[in-house]
């Protein structure tokens, strides 16, 4: 009888232990899932907040603005671009995560859409600070502000850059951009305007393109900054988005031309503007339109009082 009681007590203890372990497992699993869900929600909200910080950088007709955004922990940002969705303007998305234990990053939050901005950066960047600057882009009327996002983990070393670009970038006071002379040492991503130098990024001003990651991307005006500081895929996607916005604005200006024609204004701009509205395959096509765009701007500047289109 004593042995049977001992066996019964042992079985009860074993059953209680197994049940306790199972309940503990469920509690830990549930807590883990709750933490992950809460963490993902916070990361998604952080990405949305970051987008709202781009708003004060709208330039109007100013030459450009810049500021830095700091984070408590080392953070990672994920950018995508899709010119086919949200027609005709396309969209970008940004997702966020930060380091949790050691150098491990938490699961990234949900992607937040960016529909009314054109952010030029790499697909994945990380750091404790982001440096953001904008440049207004005209073609020939203002199309948008291009937003450049750089992490503090990337340092750019510009060699033999034109004085205008040097002045523009130095005026922004960005800690990650340097203009070393031949005797100075600069560790980072080398950007060269001297074709003979071996560099990570080469700028061919006469031909109007930037070569990086084995790819050529073409630019006009201040798009040179997007070409230098963003990945080729994001750059080409945003060029198509910008061209689509140009098309929509162009249609509005065509309607305006019909109105100002009633004031006995010439109709020279209408056919020229209509001829540059349409789809493009890549940034090279933008270069092909440049002469026509300059011609439109020249005619508009010469227009008599009350007949200017923009």
Image (cartoon, rainbow, N blue to C red):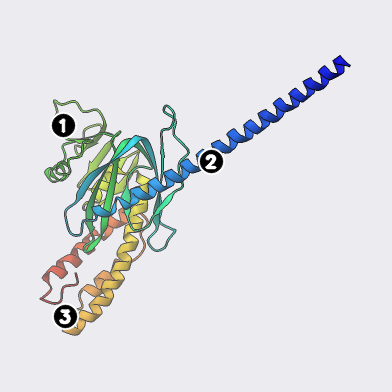
Residue 211 as seen in the image, left or right of residue 43: left
Foreground pick, 74 / 256: 74
Crowd rating for badge 2 (residues with CA inside 10 Å; few <14, some 14–19, many 20+): few
Mark 1 or mark 2, which has the lower sequence index? Answer: 2
Name the mark nearer the viewer: 3 or 2. Answer: 2
Q: Position of residue 263 (x, y in %)?
A: 17, 83
For residue 288, above or below residue 8: below
What residue did someone put label 2 on?
A: 34
Q: CA distance from mark 1 to mark 2?
A: 50 Å
Mark 1 or mark 3, which has the lower sequence index? Answer: 1
What residue did someone put label 3 on?
A: 265
Residue positioned 55% across, 39% down in the render: 33
Foreground pick, 199 / 147: 147
Residue 180: which numbered mark, if any?
Answer: 1
For residue 288, above or below residue 102: below
Residue positioned 24% across, 28% down in the render: 187
Crowd rating for badge 1 (residues with CA inside 10 Å; few <14, some 14–19, many 20+): few
Q: Could you tell me if the residues under marks 3 and 2 are in contact, i.e. CB atoms within 8 Å?
A: no
Can you say which quadrant of the picture contains the N terminus?
Answer: top right
Q: CA distance from mark 1 to mark 3?
A: 52 Å
User: Is residue 95 visible from the viewing direction of this image?
Assistant: yes
Circle 3 SS class: loop
Circle 2 SS class: helix
Splitting the image into 4 quarters, where does residue 288 fall?
bottom left
């Amino acid at each position: 009888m004593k042995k049977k009681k001992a066996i019964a007590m042992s079985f009860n203890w074993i059953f209680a232990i197994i049940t306790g372990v199972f309940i503990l497992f469920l509690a830990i699993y549930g807590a883990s899932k709750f933490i992950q869900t809460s963490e993902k929600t916070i990361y998604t909200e952080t990405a949305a907040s970051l987008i709202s910080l781009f708003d004060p950088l709208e330039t109007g007709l100013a030459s450009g603005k810049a500021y830095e955004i700091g984070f408590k922990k080392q953070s990672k940002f994920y950018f995508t671009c899709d010119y086919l969705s949200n027609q005709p303007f396309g969209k970008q998305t940004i997702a966020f995560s930060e380091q949790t234990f050691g150098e491990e990053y938490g699961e990234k939050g949900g992607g937040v859409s960016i529909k009314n901005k054109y952010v030029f950066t790499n697909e994945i960047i990380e750091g404790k600070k982001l440096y953001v600057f904008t440049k207004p882009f005209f073609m020939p009327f203002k199309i948008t502000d291009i937003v450049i996002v750089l992490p503090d983990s990337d340092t750019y070393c510009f060699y033999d850059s034109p004085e205008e670009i040097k002045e523009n970038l130095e005026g922004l006071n960005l800690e990650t951009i340097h203009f070393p002379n031949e005797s100075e040492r600069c560790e980072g991503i080398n950007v060269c305007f001297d074709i003979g130098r071996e560099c990570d990024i080469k700028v061919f001003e006469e031909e109007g393109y930037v070569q990086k990651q084995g790819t050529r991307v073409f630019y006009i005006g201040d798009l040179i900054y997007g070409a230098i500081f963003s990945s080729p895929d994001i750059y080409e996607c945003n060029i198509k988005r910008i061209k689509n916005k140009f098309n929509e604005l162009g249609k509005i200006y065509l309607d305006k031309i019909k109105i100002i024609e009633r004031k006995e204004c010439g109709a020279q701009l209408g056919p020229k503007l209509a001829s540059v509205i349409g789809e493009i395959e890549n940034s090279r096509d933008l270069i092909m339109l440049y002469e026509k765009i300059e011609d439109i701007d020249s005619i508009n500047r010469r227009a008599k009082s009350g007949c200017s289109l923009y």
